[in-house]
Image (cartoon, rainbow, N blue to C red):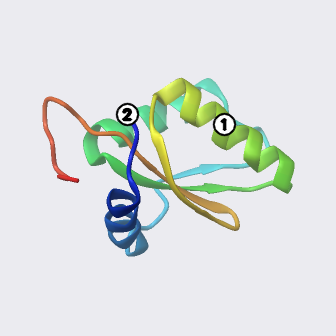
Amino acid sequence: MSLNNNQIKQLRGLCHDLSPVVMVADKGLSENVRAEIETALDSHELIKVKLRGEREQRREWIDRILAETSSELVQKIGQVACFYRPNPKNRKIVV
């Protein structure tokens, strides 16, 4: 799945008003945190995740989330990142 610029722009607008649903902190991207991200993506399709830690560590976590969840990075600002993955069974967001 690859998003074009217009789709990313639309998703950024939708992501703006969202609150973070998952927070990755000192213990990192554990199996439980990854499961929460999977559950949130299944039910919401577009989620905001707060990532605490150093810049390099946050980049590694984002790369792992993208690889392990097959989602797309919509936006990253500071310690917050937005991820999108369409749910083929229950589509809520049409891009």
For label 2, the crowd category at 10 Å Cα-Cα, with few meaning under 14, some 14 to 19 and many 20 or more, is: few
- Front-lying residue, 34 or 57: 57
Residue 80, given in percent of the width and then of the height, sits at 61, 62
Q: Nearer the viewer, residue 30 or 74?
A: 74
Residue 91 found in image quarter = top left
On the picture, is 51 further left or further right than 38? right
**Mark 1 — residue?**
63
Q: Residue at x 74, y 46 (%)?
A: 59
Q: Report x, y in % for residue 90.
A: 13, 37
x 65%, y 31%: residue: 64
Q: Would you say 22 lies left or right of 80 here?
A: left
- In the picture, measured across the screen, residue 15 lies left or right of residue 20, that is left
Q: Which residue is mark 2?
A: 1
Q: Is residue 38 left or right of residue 63?
A: left
Label 1 and label 2: CA atoms lie apart by 16 Å
* Quadrant in which the N terminus appears: top left
The count of marks equals: 2
Give the x, y percent position of residue 7: 32, 58
Amino acid type, mark 1:
Asp
Q: Secondary structure at mark 2?
A: loop
Q: Residue at x 23, y 35 (%)?
A: 87
